[in-house]
Image (spheres, grey):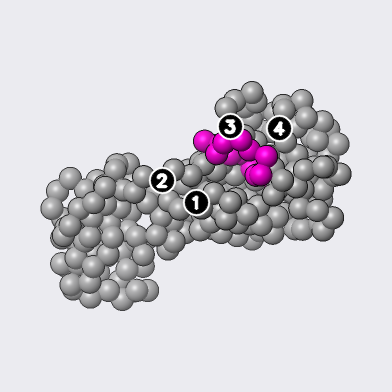
Amino acid sequence: MHVFVEHLSAHSVTVSGEDAHHLANVLRVHIGDIFPLVETNGWVWVLGRVSRLAKHEVEFTFEEQYRKPVVEHPRIILYSALLKRNAMETVLQRSVELGVDAICPIYASRSVPNTHTANRKRWATIVREAAMQSHRFEIPLVSLPCQINELPSGTAMAVIVLTTQTTDIDLKRWVDSQNKRPESIGVLVGPEGGWTSEEETLFVKKGWTRVSFGSSIMRADTATLGALSALRYAYHTVS
């Protein structure tokens, strides 16, 4: 498990809060155990050895220091329509494990937002824990929900929209059609019930590519993880 800390400028660091609780009570660390400590807003990580255990704190003494690895895969931004609480949390957790770099929830016509759905603090916790568990070197950013028409168009980012409508392009064909590796890929996935005809028209106006998984209809969370898995396989995303 990677432990994220804000700064690694000294020779030791003390972890508190939920991270310390997880280390002490779930992983049951001992004095002398070694964990990777990753700087959240920097370029380094270190091997940290547990040097002190307290009720709500775990102190690490630094061993070796390293630079974060440089990854050369496309940056993947997930634009996920707001889903019901459990499905949305599954998408957040699993997408981080699959290598997504940023997540932007969107309001779609058929979204069912509620007081639990747009809980950004809980979302941030889920994403952070998933990044720690999957040994990521960065914590993906989760932005505030926005409207589809607020998303940028005409940018250098390649944008694909998963659709259940008839289209000549499936995800594999789209990947194969790229003359060069995109620097960034935006992936739009709709809510249960799919996109409306008005939304589909908007996608065409924005110049985004609509792709399908064929004739089978998937749940929104399944389609999201399927698309991200395919892109990870295609571009070997590791970060």
Task: Give the amino acid type for the residue marked by disc 1 in the picture.
Answer: Thr
Circle 3 SS class: loop
Q: Are marks 3 and 1 in contact (CB under 8 Å)?
A: no
* Residue underneath mark 1: 237
Q: Give the residue type that dot 3 points to.
A: Met
| Residue in the image at 71% along x and 32% along y | 208
Circle 4 SS class: loop
- Please identify the quadrant where the N terminus is shown: bottom left
Residue 110 lies in magenta, yes or no?
no
Q: Which residue is mark 3?
A: 157
**Which mark, residue 145?**
none
- Where are the magenta residues, as a range? 175-190
Q: Are dots 1 and 2 in contact, CB under 8 Å?
A: yes
Is 60 in front, or is 174?
174
Between discs 3 and 2, the one toward the N terminus: 2
Is residue 231 shown to the viewer in this render? Answer: yes
Residue ID at (86%, 36%): 197
* Label number found at residue 208: 4
